[in-house]
Amino acid sequence: MANILAYFPSEDDAEDAAAKLRSLGYEDLGITKVTEYLGDSTDRRFNPMTGRISSLAKLTLGADFSAEGDDVGPLLAADPSASGLADTHEGQGANYLLTVVIADELWVSAREIIKQYGGMA
């Protein structure tokens, strides 16, 4: 068995590559968002006027730091991405990881499909 770890600049590109691989019979694969921030992405919108946010970092970076405690919020709020004075980090790199586990003889063809969709393997 072989595996491929391929990075994509967008979730759509990673999903398209995964769909193509699935249509060709590759079944053991998954997509993970890679981020530099701790915690899981928050799924709800916040209204800063209510004051019900734990930190600026949670509001602007879109991450949930509740599992790590309150210590990380103020530190991450100092990140230029949190201030609004810098462009976001997302989209500047390959933030989506497609992992494929395949038979050794299928490695080359799977890698070519990933490259067709903009993946870096």
Image (tube, rainbow, N blue to C red):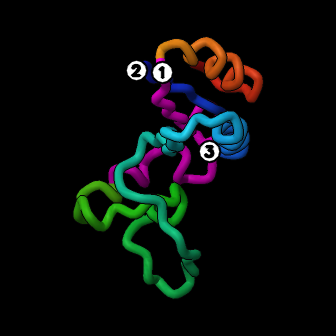
Find the distance from the CA under tag 1 to the CA under tag 3. Answer: 38 Å
Disc sitting over residue 88 in the figure: 3
Q: Is residue 71 visible to the viewer in this orientation of the structure?
A: yes
Residue position marked by numbered label 1 in the rendering? 103
Q: Residue at x 54, y 40 (%)?
A: 27
What type is the residue that disc 3 sits on?
Thr
Q: Nearer the viewer, mark 1 or mark 3?
A: 1
SS for callout 1: loop
Range drawn in magenta: 75-103
Q: Nearer the viewer, mark 3 or mark 2?
A: 2
81 to 4, vertically: above or below: below
Look at the numbered discs 3 and 2 and tell me whether their residues touch, using CB distance below 8 Å: no
Decide: few, some or many residues near mark 2? Use Cα within 10 Å; few <14, some 14-19, many ≥20. Answer: few
Q: Assess whether residue 5 is covered by the magenta stretch.
A: no
Front position in the image: 61 or 17: 17
Decide which of tag 1 and tag 2 comes sooner along the chain: 2
